[in-house]
Image (cartoon, rainbow, N blue to C red):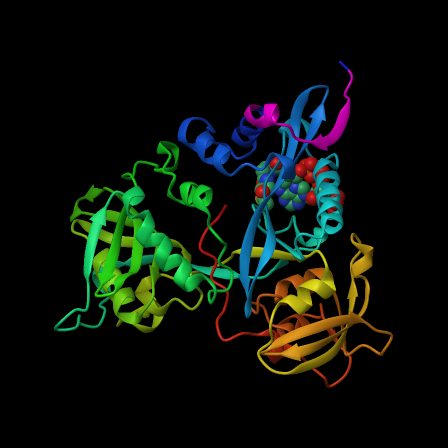
Amino acid sequence: MKEEIVLRPSNAEDFPAICRLYGTVFHEDVSGTLKEMEAGVFEVDRSLVTDDAGLVVGHIQAFTRDLTVPGAVIPAAHVSGVGVLPTHRRRGLLNRMMHRQLRELAEAGRESIAVLWASETSIYPRYGYGAAANRLVFNIMSREVRLPAPPAEPSGRLRMAEPGTLLPEMTKVYEQLRADRIGWSSRNDQWWGFVLGDPESHRDGATKRYAVVHEGPDGPTGYALWRVKDDWNSHGPNAEVQVREVVAADPETYQTLWRFLLGIDLSRSVTVRLGSVEEPLLHLVDEPRRLGAGFADALWLRLIDVPAALAARRYATDVDVVIEVTDPILEQNTGRWRLTGGPGGATCTATTDPADLSCSVTDLGAVYLGGTSLAALAAAGRVRQLTANDPTIAFRWHRLPSPTEVY
Ligand SMILES: CC(=O)SCCNC(=O)CCNC(=O)[C@H](O)C(C)(C)COP(=O)(O)OP(=O)(O)OC[C@H]1O[C@@H](n2cnc3c(N)ncnc32)[C@H](O)[C@@H]1OP(=O)(O)O
């Protein structure tokens, strides 16, 4: 049978085939709860499939969500679900899907940036995505670390319940903090459904997901989500507490939640996949080394519309700089841009003035959230600083990005 490869918008009937494709390329069973989770967030009009004579062999999609960036919350295309069947790999299908998606995002003008989590870190720089946020992975020897003693009179209490029933409290705390937390994505009801979705296939022998909220005199101030993987060895109990998310509005709540998680009976370790690179635990425990911190990449970011994106965020210090950008895919971004602004806002316009620095759109994506330093990229030889006007400090922010979810 002859191949007839067409790249086309998805329709609702493609959804089961897209789930089968996910199952094949991500090596998991996308049925039951997991399929329902995917269905809850699927945006058919933002999904593209590669079709080979009626068979879905490739897929890419974007979700409509906001992202917190330095000083602002802005629309960001959340790209996900990228896959090509093993029978069709390494023949340029991803290339075609990525190029088309980027062009369509630029034409639509809805979002000035796109973000994604990369399955392999070597794939996305060629498409203009830079490593914009990192994370710490913790493997904590929980009996070897101590937190400061709790206050004699705690200001609140912990309440455990089914995660779904604590949704109003969790939403309230998340929304209260989101505008100031770089790299956090907006969560509507569908996205909370996705975050709290608890498919059996994701448990790997661990319990279902648990939730606890911290309630102060004026309402909820934090929550934690986790599972426990039971284990016994020759020393006795050896369970692992697998923390999904800890959100706390104040230090007392943060310490109370962590004291709780580190102290769960019959456990000897606590693991965290999405720890912040500035995780306060690092400064709280008596033996930080026993947190077993490991460094990993997190969000990758692409500027779709360079002047709009640069004007949308704020800057740590006043800045007036000309940046020469190269973008081989979205040519309209290539050129010299004068960025003028500071902590109160910014403008960005095309200019013919000489450049202070030159870089690729990938480098600009890497520094956009303040998580990667322009000076570090210059030291690597990726960014060329051409004058003494160095905007490295302006591009940083008082908080480093701390994405909370892989979507
Ligand atoms: C945001 C997300 O959803 S991340 C999830 C990405 N998906 C996965 O990892 C699932 C498993 N893998 C796959 O489905 C496929 O292998 C994909 C989607 C990664 C790549 O699809 P393909 O159609 O084979 O890619 P394509 O042939 O267009 O290659 C494009 C380029 O990326 C490179 N590339 C493709 N896959 C990989 C990889 N896994 N690792 C490193 N480089 C890769 C190719 O070498 C090629 O480079 P070139 O342009 O310099 O020649």
| Front residue (pair 4, 45) | 45
Rendered image quadrant of residue 138: bottom left
Q: Is residue 138 left or right of residue 61?
A: left
Image position of 326 with respect to 110: above or below:
below
Residue 157 left/right relative to 330: left
Q: Name which residue lies at 17% across and 49% down.
A: 266
> At 47% from the left edge and 60% from the top edge, which residue is drawn?
135
The part of the image, by quadrant, that contains residue 94 is top right
Q: Is residue 7 magenta?
A: yes
Residue at the spot 71% in from the left edge and 67% down from the top edge:
382
Q: Is residue 344 above or below residue 142?
A: below
**Residue 138 seen:** no
- The magenta span reads 2-16
Residue placed furthest toward the top: 1
Looking at this rendering, what residue extends furthest in the right direction?
A: 352
Q: Is residue 386 above or below residue 13?
A: below
Which quarter of the figure has residue 301? Answer: bottom right
Instruction: Please name the residue shown 67% across and 52% down the image.
Output: 110
**Is residue 314 at all visible to an observer of this figure?**
yes
Which quadrant of the frame does ligand 1 lie within? top right
Q: Is residue 114 left or right of residue 212?
A: right
In the rendered image, residue 95 lying in the magenta stretch gets the answer: no
Q: Who is closer to the viewer here, 51 or 36? A: 36
Image height of 115 relative to 231, above or below: below
Q: How many numbered discs?
A: 0
* Residue 246 picture location, percent across and down: 34, 57
Q: Quadrant of the N terminus?
A: top right
Extreme residue toward the bottom, this view: 388
The residue furthest front is 218
Percent position of residue 87, x then y: 66, 26
Q: Position of residue 37 (x, y in %)?
A: 45, 35
- Horizontal and vertical percent for residue 167? 33, 48
